[in-house]
Image: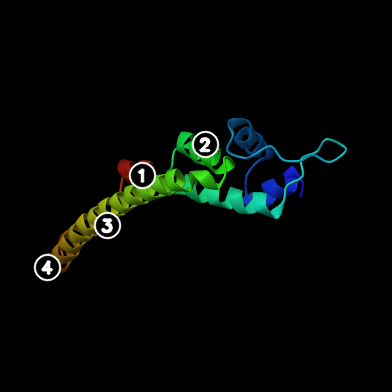
Amino acid sequence: MTISELAERAGLSTYTLRFYEKAGVLSPTPRATNGHRRYLDADVRWLAFVMRLKATGMPLAEIKRYAQLRAQGDGTVAPRLDMLLEHRETLVRKLQELQDNMAALDDKVTIYQAMLQQAPSVPKRTEKPTRKSAKA
């Protein structure tokens, strides 16, 4: 598949794919006789994994380091596993933090809902006066 086809399939720009190749995240791919890059299904799967790492907050420098280890072959399985386990632990901490924050918001929502039910004189919405209503 061409770089344009891969970009469309991945939802990325061709510029981003070239950048990833230059940065070492994507391996240089074979080229057709016309010089155009030709990607394989394995490249698509690898890019999908890279995008998952990126979506979960792994810094590009770490993704690059992971890609370099991957390119070295099966002898680097242990350090790659360590990287993924460390990243997973970071995600677990972030998920807990998000859950804690959501619980605090839920508590505040419950308090405000109770206030509105108990005191009908409490305004239901805060609205900014518009120019027209401000003149009236």
Q: Residue shown at 70%/48% (left/top)?
A: 6
Mark 1: which secondary structure?
Answer: loop
First of labels 4, 1 by sequence position: 4
Q: Is residue 115 above or below residue 31?
A: below
The Cα–Cα distance between marks 2 and 1, rounded to whole angstroms, is: 52 Å
Judged left or right of residue 10, residue 131 is left
Amino acid found under the numbered disc labelled 4: Gln
Residue pictured at 74% horizontal, 49% vertical: 5
The answer to whether the residue labelled 2 contacts the one labelled 4, judged by CB atoms less than 8 Å apart, is no
Q: Residues within 10 Å of mark 4 (few under 14, many from 20)?
A: few
Q: Of discs 4 and 1, which sits in the foreground?
A: 4
Which of marks 1 and 2 precedes in the sequence?
2
How is the protein colored in the picture?
A: rainbow
Name the residue tied to disc 2: 64
Q: Which residue is mark 1?
A: 130
The amino acid sitting under disc 2 is Lys
Counting from the top left corner in percent of width and height, residue 31 is at 79, 39
Q: Calculate the distance from the C-alpha at mark 4 to the C-alpha at mark 1.
A: 29 Å
Per the rendering, the mark at residue 118 is 4
Circles 2, 1 touching at the beta carbon (< 8 Å): no
Q: Please indicate, yes or no, whether residue 63 appears anywhere in the rendered image.
A: yes
Q: Residue 3 appears in which quarter of the rendering?
A: top right
Measure how far apart labels 3 and 4 are at the Cα level: 29 Å
Residue 136 visible? The answer is no
Q: Secondary structure at mark 4?
A: helix
Q: Residue furthest left?
A: 118
Residue 9 appears at what percent x and percent y? 67, 53
Image mark for residue 99: 3
Q: Quadrant of residue 129?
A: top left
Q: Which callout, 3 or 2, points at the residue further toward the start of the chain?
A: 2
Q: Amino acid at mark 1?
A: Thr
